[in-house]
Image: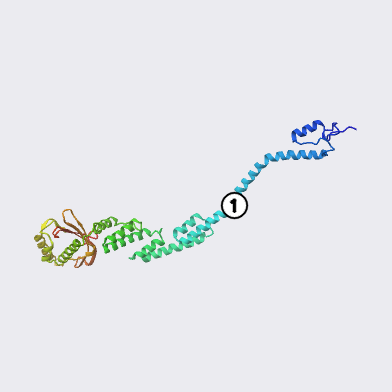
Amino acid sequence: MPHLCPLCGNEKNRETLFCDSCTKKLRAEYEVDLPQSEQQHPGPSTGEVMNEEVEVIADKGSKGSSPILWIFISLLLLVVAFFLYNELIRKGNLERSGWDAATKANSVAGYLHYIENHPDGAHFADAETALMRLKADEANQWEAMKHSDRITELRDFLRRFPDSYYAPLVKRRLDSLSWMGALHSNSAVAYSDYMMMAKSGEFKGDYLTEAESRYHMLFQAFPVDMVVMDSIRVVVRDFCAAYSSLDYAKLEQRLAPRLQRFFNRGHLLRERLLGELLMDAAQSGEAMATYIPDLEGVQYEKTPEESYLVNVPFLKSANGSLYAGQLPGYILHLELNPESQITAVYESRPYPGAP
């Protein structure tokens, strides 16, 4: 009885599983090592061989398409995950942190920032309520303090309401009050403090130029010789006392025979000046203003000609019809010759039109 090949049905040798043609085909296409005989390695049936062939072909197909499919699925999952994170987690975190920042600042600007950036936020209504409360409080405080002379109150208002509509008005008032305080102290330190506040942005600094000028007048930039300083202070004290009381004898001692300037008068002799002063006092019928110098604030500079330029902060005090009380912020300017005699006298007033 002939032996047939289970794959093609052709005759084969008794010792082999398949005919020569099928054996070559299997080895070439599927790289299968076939046993040489049925006795040594029983071969699979026809059905098993067909299943193996299908599996091999399917495995080849899956190796080509699987990576692309998985990459596409992975990208799709990443997009969906990012969308969910952005909508559900990130926006929620930003809204919560925005509300925390607004409540911590507790300011008009803070609540406005939350309202503008989170119009659908969970705390939108709370932000509006807090904003309206602060605005009402701001208006009430301004009404209560708009005529205040207390610098601390004005600074506290600016700290609480830095973006208030009233802030420019508060800063202007703070500027004026700070300048009045500097004039009242009338010292290099006071003018330096005003300059620092203006330059730091605490207020505009409407008087910054004047403050700088007065600072240089009263700041002792050169080393002090205490013997010279004491001598200058004696001259200043005697002149202010004699001029305030129109003491002819003491003025004659302190004034040089010829003066370059005496307030608004130009070059003139000492005797003529003293006569004019006595006549002016008799005609006006009012006592001269009292000059009260701050001797501790005296500043001097020695010139190459061995003379001295002296600046002295002082108060004017009077009870006449022109003004009454004490006026601060004056600076007396004296020039002394080497014999410590006054050759020039004039003053800087605290404001234009001051007596």
Which residue is rendered at x = 23% and y = 67% of the image? 326
Q: Is 101 situated left or right of 144 in this image?
A: right
Q: Amino acid at mark 1?
A: Leu
Q: Nearer the viewer, residue 168 or 17?
A: 17
- The quadrant in which residue 188 appears is bottom left
Residue 294 shows up from this direction = no
- As displayed, is residue 12 above or below residue 316? above
Q: Secondary structure at mark 1?
A: helix
Q: How is the image coloured?
A: rainbow
Could you tell me residue 116's position as x and y percent?
A: 48, 55
Could you tell me residue 11's position as x and y percent?
A: 85, 31
Which residue is rendered at x = 61% and y = 49% of the image? 80
- The quadrant in which residue 2 appears is top right
The C terminus appears in which quarter of the rendering? bottom left
Residue 155 shows up from this direction = yes
User: Residue under circle 1?
Assistant: 84
The N terminus appears in which quarter of the rendering? top right
Q: Residues within 10 Å of mark 1 (few under 14, many from 20)?
A: few
Q: Is 70 situated left or right of 307 in this image?
A: right
Residue at the outermost front position = 40
Could you tell me residue 89's position as x and y percent?
A: 57, 55
Residue at the outermost right position = 1
Which residue is rendered at x = 19% and y = 63% of the image? 230
Could you tell me residue 213's position as x and y percent?
A: 25, 56
Q: Is 152 situated left or right of 39 in this image?
A: left
Q: Nearer the viewer, residue 164 or 13?
A: 13
Q: Nearer the viewer, residue 335 or 108?
A: 335
